[in-house]
Image (cartoon, rainbow, N blue to C red):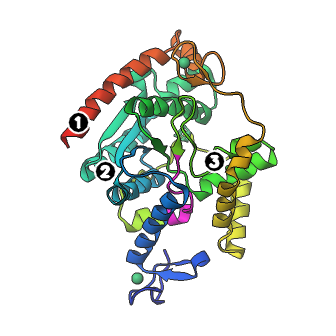
């Protein structure tokens, strides 16, 4: 936020920020409207959801997912979709405890049905215990677990899509990195939406055209509660960090660069889908979840940690949770 005596481009209030690519100075209220309108337009532009859809929003408690949930809650009334929140408690000490509280309180105050999946309750192990038993890098293990649990919950709920809080500054470095490494098919998964296919519920990214700075300012101005601390495992790695610096510099010199880039990727997404196409997904022999090999990564990893694959067991537990929560939904 900038201290300024410059007036908002739409009213007589002092501006709190300048949007370079739109050549606008905006006051608090008009900035909030600007971001919400942008997400609404993103929905329309890319067909992210419609009337009577059931959207499952994955909410970690950080500024991005909390802002996404808050905006989706507003849009759900205008567009007419049903919104359910999902939080995964990874059991990473204080960080997870605070994150869960933030999400539970926010959903309660907004009246959004919430499903919490507690990794320790589901598998007997929290993330740090899994990390020490498998010696895998925490974020890759965490990503694998979250993808699995989110998909199981989305399937159980018969959700049309899973909403993720990824913004421009999350996505562009990965797109560029995959381009540099020529993992072109991977780029097809980084657009505004993926389709439901072979048991994998489609993903939508409502913040596809919003930058990290914009989300931070939105969360602050809308007075949203979010977890301030970073996950203790988080670390921005070499190449991604360099690319982030590059795109931020490019945006400063050429306002609108990031959005133009994101739109071009979205426009060409079909091309990336057809380049270096992966083998169609199989079904895990143990838990029947979509998998790249005979046995899914979740079953493999839990076999290592718990001595037996837990996919089927975890799916049954989630199915039971989901029934409880749907009953709750229908009574609110
Ligand atoms: Fe998981 Fe890594 Fe994010 Fe922590 S930083 S929540 S371990 S992906
Ligand atoms: Zn204004
Ligand atoms: Zn499995």
Q: Residue at x 41, y 70 (%)?
A: 32
Task: Give the residue furthest to the top.
Answer: 307
Task: Give the residue furthest to the left.
Answer: 331
- Residue 328's label in the rendered image is 1
Quadrant holding ligand 3?
top right
Q: Provide residue 10's location: percent of width, then percent of height.
A: 43, 85
Q: Is disc 1 placed on a helix, strand or loop?
A: helix
Mark 1 C-beta closer than 8 Å to ligand 1: no
Q: State how far apart marks 1 and 2 are (Cα).
A: 17 Å
Dot placed on the residue nearer the N-terminal end, 1 or 3 = 3
Q: Provide residue 142's location: percent of width, then percent of height.
A: 55, 33
Front-most of 297 and 45? 45
Q: Is residue 18 visible in this depiction of the protein?
A: yes
Magenta segment: does it hold 226? no
Q: Which range of residues does the magenta coloring cover?
A: 204-215
Q: Is residue 106 above or below residue 113?
A: below
Magenta segment: does it hold 210? yes
Q: Provide residue 269's location: percent of width, then percent of height.
A: 68, 50
Q: Is disc 2 placed on a helix, strand or loop?
A: helix
Which quadrant of the figure has residue 330?
top left
Q: Provide residue 198's location: percent of width, then percent of height.
A: 57, 29
Structural crowding at the residue carrying mark 1, measured as other residues with C-alpha within 10 Å and reported as few (<14), some (14–19) or many (≥20): few
Q: Which residue is mark 2?
A: 106
Q: Is residue 170 above or below residue 215?
A: above
Q: State how far apart marks 1 and 3 are (Cα).
A: 34 Å
Q: Which residue is mark 3?
A: 190
| Quadrant of the drawing holding the C terminus | top left
Dot placed on the residue nearer the N-terminal end, 1 or 2 = 2
Structural crowding at the residue carrying mark 2, measured as other residues with C-alpha within 10 Å and reported as few (<14), some (14–19) or many (≥20): many
Dot placed on the residue nearer the N-terminal end, 2 or 3 = 2
Q: Is residue 309 left or right of residue 223?
A: right
């Amino acid at each position: 936020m900038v201290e300024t005596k410059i007036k908002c481009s739409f009213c007589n209030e002092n501006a709190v920020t300048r949007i370079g690519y739109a050549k606008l100075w905006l006051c608090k209220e008009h900035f909030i409207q600007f971001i919400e309108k942008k997400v609404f337009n993103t929905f329309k532009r890319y067909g992210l959801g419609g009337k009577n859809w059931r959207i499952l929003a994955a909410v970690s408690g950080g500024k991005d997912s909390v802002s996404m949930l808050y905006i989706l809650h507003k849009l759900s009334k205008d567009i007419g979709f049903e919104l359910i929140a999902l939080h995964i408690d990874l059991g990473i000490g204080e960080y997870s405890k605070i994150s869960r509280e933030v999400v539970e309180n926010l959903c309660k105050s907004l009246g959004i049905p919430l499903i919490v999946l507690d990794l320790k309750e589901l598998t007997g192990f929290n993330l740090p215990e899994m990390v020490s038993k498998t010696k895998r890098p925490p974020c890759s293990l965490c990503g694998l677990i979250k993808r699995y649990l989110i998909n199981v919950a989305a399937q159980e709920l018969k959700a049309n899509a899973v909403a993720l809080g990824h913004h421009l500054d999350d996505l562009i470095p990965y797109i560029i990195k995959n381009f540099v490494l020529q993992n072109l098919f991977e780029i097809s998964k980084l657009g505004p939406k993926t389709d439901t296919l072979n048991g994998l519920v489609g993903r939508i990214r409502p913040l596809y055209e919003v930058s990290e700075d914009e989300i931070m300012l939105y969360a602050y101005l809308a007075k949203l509660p979010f977890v301030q601390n970073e996950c203790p495992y988080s670390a921005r790695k070499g190449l991604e960090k360099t690319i982030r610096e590059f795109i931020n510099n490019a945006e400063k010199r050429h306002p609108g660069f990031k959005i133009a880039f994101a739109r071009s990727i979205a426009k060409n997404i079909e091309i990336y889908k057809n380049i270096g196409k992966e083998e169609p997904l199989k079904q895990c022999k143990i838990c029947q979840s979509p998998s790249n090999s005979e046995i899914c990564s979740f079953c493999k990893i839990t076999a290592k940690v718990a001595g037996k694959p837990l996919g089927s067991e975890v799916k049954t537990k989630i199915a039971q949770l989901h029934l409880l929560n749907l009953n709750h939904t229908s009574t609110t």
